[in-house]
Image (spheres, rainbow, N blue to C red):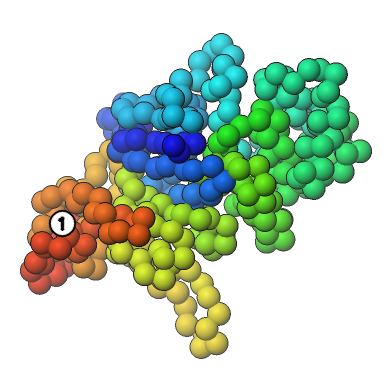
């Protein structure tokens, strides 16, 4: 049984000027205990909306979220049950997510209270959590503005751990940090997943970081998951043209000064998605079936799937068309 299972999730926002916007259009992801699943894609593809819906911060239009095998209730005004609080979230900007008027020790203690830890044990457990994330115990009485960005993010992780979660969803937790702080935080996430048996869903646009820490990678495009595979397998042999383009765009030292290939075009408006395969207006391999039909997720074996007609054994593509001619 997966610690976190997201099934056919849909998130719809209502905009008077644009009509309904399906930010997430039927995405499914599962995360096992002790596993890090990376969710990648360009800005605007729906990653953050999926993350917020997964923890109940935004309503689900359809689909379900299971936490340790039971449905997770949406977040409401009243306090969450102890069972539902076993899913926690770490946000992109730790300075905005931490209360500037309260000490970090008091904020971590909130999580301990939620987990049912007696108040007499709060001080000892708070200092233990800070030590686990690499913050000196003496800092317990200090305020968020007295720490660097990397330290604040580790404090935010400690606060999430205080609730004794089984699942932690991390929405771009490393993007605001410098390279050194990114490396420290990334290594911390790997250690926490292994030592605590946590299930981590890591949302990021930085494929290099995801390649370093994730066990499995799901690739999202315009609200749908188009490929999922073990990390090394996906990087060595991507099976969806969008994944192939993302991997090709990663800078690497080749000694020849060759620049990475940029993916042409932009993510379409989710309020008016293209017909058929959502990637077809930008795909170099597009053919007539891509324009008319929505590709299913094909099971390719070895724990990988891809939503591309090129992976259909019965497909006999015609000559590729010009993407600009087939765009809708």
Give the quadrant of residue 183.
bottom right
In this view, which residue lies farthest toward the bottom? Answer: 256
Secondary structure type for disc 1: helix
Give the quadrant of residue 209.
bottom right
Foreground of the two, 8 or 270:
8
- Locate residue 321, reporting x and y percent: 13, 67
* 57 sits left or right of 300 in the view: right
* 114 sits left or right of 118 in the view: left
Residue 45's place in the image compared with 95, above or below, is: below
Identify the residue at horizontal 60%, vertical 19% (top origin): 82
Give the quadrant of residue 97.
top right
Residue 17 visible somewhere in the drawing? no
Residue 272's place in the image compared with 63, above or below, is: below
Residue bearing mark 1:
290
Identify the residue at horizontal 53%, vertical 48% (top origin): 35
- Locate residue 244, reporting x and y percent: 35, 67
Identify the residue at horizontal 24%, vertical 68% (top origin): 284
């Amino acid at each position: 049984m997966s610690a976190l299972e997201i099934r056919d999730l849909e998130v719809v926002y209502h905009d008077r000027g644009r009509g309904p916007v399906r930010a997430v259009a039927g995405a499914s992801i599962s995360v096992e205990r002790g596993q890090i699943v990376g969710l990648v894609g360009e800005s605007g593809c729906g990653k953050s909306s999926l993350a917020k819906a997964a923890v109940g911060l935004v309503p689900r239009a359809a689909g379900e979220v299971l936490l340790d095998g039971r449905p997770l209730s949406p977040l409401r005004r009243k306090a969450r049950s102890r069972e539902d609080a076993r899913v926690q979230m770490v946000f992109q900007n730790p300075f905005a997510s931490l209360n500037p008027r309260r000490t970090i020790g008091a904020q971590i203690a909130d999580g301990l209270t939620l987990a049912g830890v007696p108040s007499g044990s709060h001080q000892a457990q708070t200092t233990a959590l800070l030590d686990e994330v690499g913050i000196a115990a003496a800092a317990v009485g200090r305020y968020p503005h007295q720490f660097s960005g990397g330290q604040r993010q580790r404090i935010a992780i400690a606060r999430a751990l205080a609730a004794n979660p089984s699942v932690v969803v991390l929405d771009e937790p490393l993007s605001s940090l410098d390279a050194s702080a990114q490396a420290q935080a990334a290594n911390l996430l790997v250690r926490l997943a292994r030592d605590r048996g946590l299930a981590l869903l890591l949302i990021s646009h930085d494929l290099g970081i995801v390649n370093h820490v994730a066990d499995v990678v799901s690739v999202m495009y315009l609200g749908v998951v188009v490929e999922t595979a073990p990390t090394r397998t996906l990087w060595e042999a991507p099976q969806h043209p969008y994944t192939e383009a993302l991997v090709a765009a990663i800078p690497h030292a080749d000694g020849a000064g060759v620049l990475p290939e940029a993916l042409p075009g932009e993510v379409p408006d989710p309020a008016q998605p293209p017909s058929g395969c959502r990637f077809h207006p930008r795909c170099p391999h597009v053919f007539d079936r891509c324009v008319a039909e929505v590709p299913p997720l094909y099971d390719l074996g070895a724990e990988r799937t891809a939503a591309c007609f090129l992976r259909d054994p019965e497909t006999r593509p015609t000559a590729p068309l010009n993407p600009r001619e087939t765009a809708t």
